[in-house]
Image (cartoon, rainbow, N blue to C red):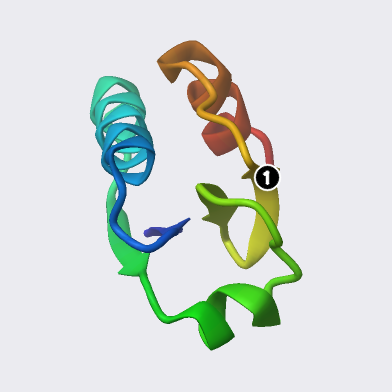
Amino acid sequence: MKSIKILGTGCAKCKKLADHARTAANELGIEYELEKVTEVNEIMKHGVMMTPGLVIEGEVKSAGKIPDVEAIKKMLASP
């Protein structure tokens, strides 16, 4: 099961990133757990200064932008 975290305070961009991540994982047919991290101190622990942030399996894959579904699929598919 893949761990996916969305880092952000709950803004529209954060919600859109969560939707993209959910769509990408579903299209790949992988099992995943999606967690939304809204606490600023927790976000900063990942070294993310601009939200939204995308963390897959503990590794920051994106910060400050919203990757499209295809880009997230590539991130999820890579080991």
Rendered position, 11 above or below 23: below
User: So how many labels did they put on this image?
Assistant: 1
Q: Secondary structure at mark 1?
A: strand
Q: Give the residue drawn at x 28%, y 38%.
A: 12
Outermost residue, bottom direction? Answer: 41
Q: Give the residue drawn at x 31%, y 48%.
A: 11
The quadrant in which residue 43 appears is bottom right
Q: Residue 37 at x, y = what percent?
A: 39, 71
Q: Residue 27 at x, y = what percent?
A: 27, 20
* Residue under numbered circle 1: 61
Task: Choose between 8 and 23: the one closer to the eye.
Answer: 8
Outermost residue, right direction? Answer: 47
Q: Give the residue drawn at x 35%, y 26%.
A: 24
Q: Residue 75 at x, y = what percent?
A: 61, 33
**Horizontal relation, residue 26 to residue 13: left or right:** left
Q: Quadrant of the N terminus?
A: bottom left
The quadrant in which residue 67 appears is top right
Neighbour class for label 1 at 10 Å: few (<14), some, many (≥20)?
A: some
Task: Choose between 68 and 24: the one closer to the eye.
Answer: 68
Q: Residue 70 at x, y = what percent?
A: 49, 12
The quadrant in which residue 79 appears is top right
Q: Amino acid at mark 1?
A: Lys
Rendered position, 70 above or below 34: above
**Horizontal relation, residue 19 to residue 78: left or right:** left
